[in-house]
Amino acid sequence: MRRRFHTLDVFTETPFAGNPLAVVLDCDGLTPARMQQIAREFALSETAFVLPPRDPVNSARIRIFTPKSELPFAGHPTIGSAILIAQLEAAEFLSSEDLSIVIEEEIGTISCTVRQRKGRAARAEFILPQLPDRIDAALNVEQLAAALGIEPGSIGFDGHEPSIYSCGNAFVFVPVDTLETIGRASPRFPQYADAMPSQTAKVYVYTRDVEQKGSAFHARMFAPSLGIPEDPATGSAAAAFAGVLREFEEPYDGEHSFIIEQGYEMGRPSLITLTLDIVKGRLASAMIGGAAVRVSEGEIDA
């Protein structure tokens, strides 16, 4: 059966930047095993498969696959799929008003707002389907440094220490001192496998030292065991990063927005907006936002 697909670059307003995403439409009848094969064929960090929603009041259901496994939730497939669905289903309204797109994922139902204004790329934002959880596990600074090929003394800044948070996907968060350090970071084996707790093999390295004015943090994400040597933009990591910021930044009550830059070392600059709502010192909600542009479309025989 011929099935339509589109590719988009997500967390960017410029084609050939951001994080590439394949979105396959008309996926009724596709088995998970077949979806995994298609994701492996596209060989992108993630591929989204659009299905009819279980609840007809919602816009769609999507399943998300890396080249090696299925994910219950991921940020750039959520942003890209919401924008594509809005453009395909309600393009005439999108130019004049914001649209609500409600997507069912394995983690739960996610409410997205999509907007597109003349001369600008479409943009979407969504409220996190669950708040990040801190995972208590021993992290050894010397082991993490050896795993990433950096010096132990370069890990940590302004009270930030290595931690593990999850918002559907667990990440080891490693703060480092400078852009120079983060530029040298790269998984080293077998030290990498030895340093990772059993809950995750995904590492998010970040620094307050940034490339672009207006950015709050610069980040890189490595997940070699998922078939992702490095990711240009990782929305699910940014979602979990909300817990890191609540813990180490200790923001006062109110709304706080942070722009996270990622993908610069890969030649695919990406910008993710993370917004925290703090109430009585606690994280009450958080939101991920970003732009996306369509790059290609076609059909796949699947």
Image (cartoon, rainbow, N blue to C red):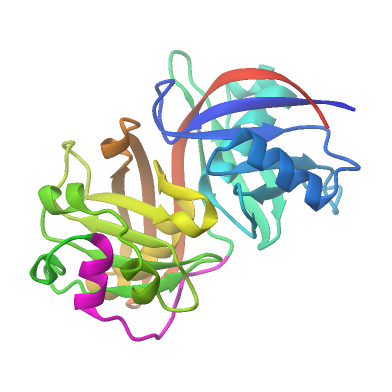
Taking the view exactly as shown, the residue that stands out farthest to the top is: 119
Taking the view exactly as shown, the residue that stands out farthest to the left is: 153
Q: Point out the image quarter for the C terminus.
A: top right
Q: Nearer the viewer, residue 46 or 101?
A: 46
Taking the view exactly as shown, the residue that stands out farthest to the front is: 190
Q: Residue at x 22, y 43 (%)?
A: 215
Residue 6, visible in the rendered structure? yes
Q: Residue at x 56, y 52 (%)?
A: 74
Q: Nearer the viewer, residue 44 or 23?
A: 44
Q: Nearer the viewer, residue 71 or 55?
A: 71
Horizontal side, residue 24 vs residue 11: left or right: right
Q: Where's residue 150, x and y in %?
A: 16, 61
Q: Which residues are magenta?
A: 130-148
Vertical position of residue 142 compared to residue 170: above or below: below
133 within the magenta span: yes
Horizontal side, residue 25 vs residue 91: left or right: right
Q: Nearer the viewer, residue 96 or 250?
A: 250
30 within the magenta span: no
Q: Residue at x 83, y 38 (%)?
A: 27
Q: Point out the image quarter for the N terminus.
A: top right
> In the figure, residue 129 lies in which quadrant?
bottom right
Residue 251, visible in the rendered structure? no
Q: How many marks?
A: 0
Q: Where's residue 251, x and y in %?
A: 25, 68
Q: Where's residue 199, x and y in %?
A: 50, 76
Vertical position of residue 172 compared to residue 268: above or below: below
Q: Where's residue 247, x and y in %?
A: 29, 75
Q: Residue at x 56, y 35 (%)?
A: 21
Horizontal side, residue 88 vs residue 289: left or right: right
